[in-house]
Image (cartoon, rainbow, N blue to C red):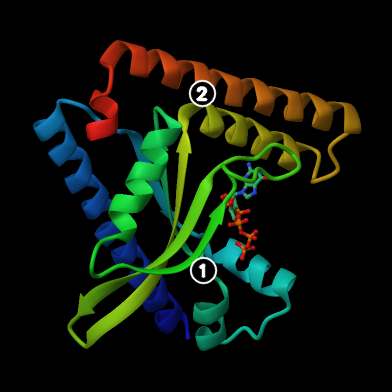
Amino acid sequence: MRDEFQHLLLEYEFGLREVETKLGILRDEFQQMHDYNPIEHVSSRVKAADSIVDKVARKGIEPDFDTIRASITDIAGVRVTCSFVADAYRLFDLLTAQDDITILRVKDYIAEPKPNGYKSLHAVVQVPVFLSSGRVDVPVEVQFRTIAMDFWASLEHKIYYKYDARVPGSLLAELKDAADTAAELDSRMERLHRELHGPRIERV
Ligand code: 0O2
């Protein structure tokens, strides 16, 4: 049982590597072709075993491997932090257009932010991994966001856990306000960037 679980997690680890390689190739090609890097930072993680067990309990799903595979799609997660909103969408388009990538689900919290102010573009994609036993298709959740969105989300996450999900109303209002400020900063920075580089950003 333990070995089977370890093997399951290893498949997700390989799925992450595939997606990270794809993102690294896009970043390096952009840098070389356009002298421009649309990716600020990429981080990834395989969900900790404890968090998977918590999620299984929270969702009330059967704790067998097949159900876990089918129901929990963020066991492998990659976060792509970009300078500008346009880059977040551009990277999403370039990654999901690749032949061996299948889009399973998209949630565009940039176009439609969550009520608390959370913004990010989420895509659950399936990527093939070739093992000695054959091909397995591994779901990976990829989150695309700007530096400002990432800054906000990481602070909000800390506050949420500090208050054990019972965040006081005044703090929630401040967080929403901060999210609006972050969105305004994103717009201003992107406008400045366009002024600086002219239409070049449109071409790359
Ligand atoms: P962690 O620690 O990042 O892994 P799901 O429960 O995943 O099947 P859900 O919740 O509808 O379905 O998925 P969604 O909306 O795509 O969000 C999942 C992930 O997005 C979360 O993972 C967070 O990483 C991030 N996220 C979503 N909403 C918020 C938010 O309001 N604030 C912050 N800071 N992050 C958010 P986990 O598993 O919750 O956490």
State the image quarter where residue 50 is shown.
bottom right
The three-letter code of the residue at mark 1 reads: Thr
As drawn, 135 above or below 184: below
* Residue 147, image x, y percentages: 47, 28
- Residue at image point 20% right, 77% down: 130
| Residue farthest to the right, as pictured | 169
Name the residue carrying label 1: 73
Q: Is residue 133 left or right of residue 79?
A: left
Question: Looking at the picture, how far across and down is residue 160, in whole percent?
Answer: 74, 40
* Number of residues whose C-alpha sits closer than 10 Å to that of mark 2, classed few (under 14), some (14–19) or many (20 or more): some
Q: Residue at x 84, y 37 (%)?
A: 167
Looking at the picture, tell me which residue is in the foreground, 121 or 42.
121
Q: Residue furthest front?
A: 199
Left or right: 134 in relation to 4 = left
Please tell me the numbered disc located at residue 115.
none
Q: Quadrant of the C terminus?
A: top left
Disc 1, ligand 1: is the CB inside 8 Å? yes
Secondary structure under the numbered disc 1 in the rendered image? loop
Total numbered labels placed on residues in the image:
2
Q: Residue beneath label 2, please?
A: 186
Tell me the kind of residue under disc 2.
Answer: Asp
Residue under the point 57% across and 77% down: 71
Q: Residue at x 26, y 48 (%)?
A: 23
Q: Nearer the viewer, residue 137 or 68?
A: 137
**Distance from label 1 to label 2 (Cα)?**
29 Å
Q: Quadrant of residue 95?
A: bottom left
- Estimate the x, y position of residue 134 in percent, counting from the top left: 21, 86
